[in-house]
Every structure is written in structure tokens, then in C-alpha cells.
Image (spheres, grey):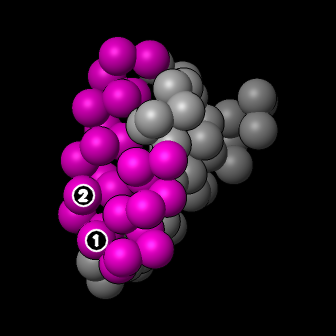
Amino acid sequence: MSDQIIALVIWYAKEGLGRHVQVLCSEAIRRKRGDVALQLWRAYGLCLEGSYSEALRELQALSNNQEV
């Protein structure tokens, strides 16, 4: 994962811009499949937007991942 991407994700998260976090992480995940950190940040973005059940599904999928 690029340092620029993670810096932007963190900045968006600090500003409370959950939708931007989700979009940026989704685009980066398409380029680099299986990046657990980006999946975690995407779930956090969902929480910021109030989509708790969807975020929980994302986190449960991560908990089933052997790499985590």
C-alpha cells in the first residue's frame, strides 16, 4: 500500500469523511487484492457513515481470513 494512499485515508478519517475513505479504499483494493489494512479502513469508513451492519459484515469477513 502506498504511503500517500494511507496518509489520505487517515486524513479523510480524521475529518469524518467516511464516504471518501470507502471510495479510496475500494479503488486501492481493486488494484491490490487482499490488502487487509485497506479492508479494515473501508469498514471504518462505513461506520463513519452509519452503516454499522455492513461494516460488521466486512469485519466478520476479515476475522475469517487466515492472514489476519
Which residue is labeled 2 in the image? Answer: 20
Tell me the quadrant of the picture where the N terminus can be found.
top right
Q: Quadrant of residue 45?
A: bottom left
Q: Dot 1: few (<14), some (14–19), or many (≥20) neighbours within 10 Å? A: some
Q: Quadrant of residue 32?
A: top left
Examine the structure image and report whether residue 13 is included in the region drawn in magenta. yes
- Helix, strand or loop under label 2: helix
- Note whether residue 57 is visible: no
- Note whether residue 4 is visible: yes
- Which disc is residue 61 wearing? none
Range of residues picked out in magenta = 7-32
Examine the structure image and report whether residue 6 is included in the region drawn in magenta. no
In the rendered view, tell whether residue 53 sits above or below residue 19.
Answer: below
Marks 1 and 2, Cα distance to the nearest angstrom?
Answer: 6 Å
Q: Look at the numbered discs 1 and 2 and tell me whether their residues touch, using CB distance below 8 Å.
A: yes
Say left or right for 28 vs 56: left
- Which disc is residue 17 wearing? 1
Q: Residue 42: x, y in percent?
A: 42, 53
Q: Which residue shows up at 31% across the image and 22% down it? A: 30
Say left or right for 23 vs 32: left
Q: Which residue shows up at 30% across the image and 53% down it? A: 22
- Helix, strand or loop under label 1: loop
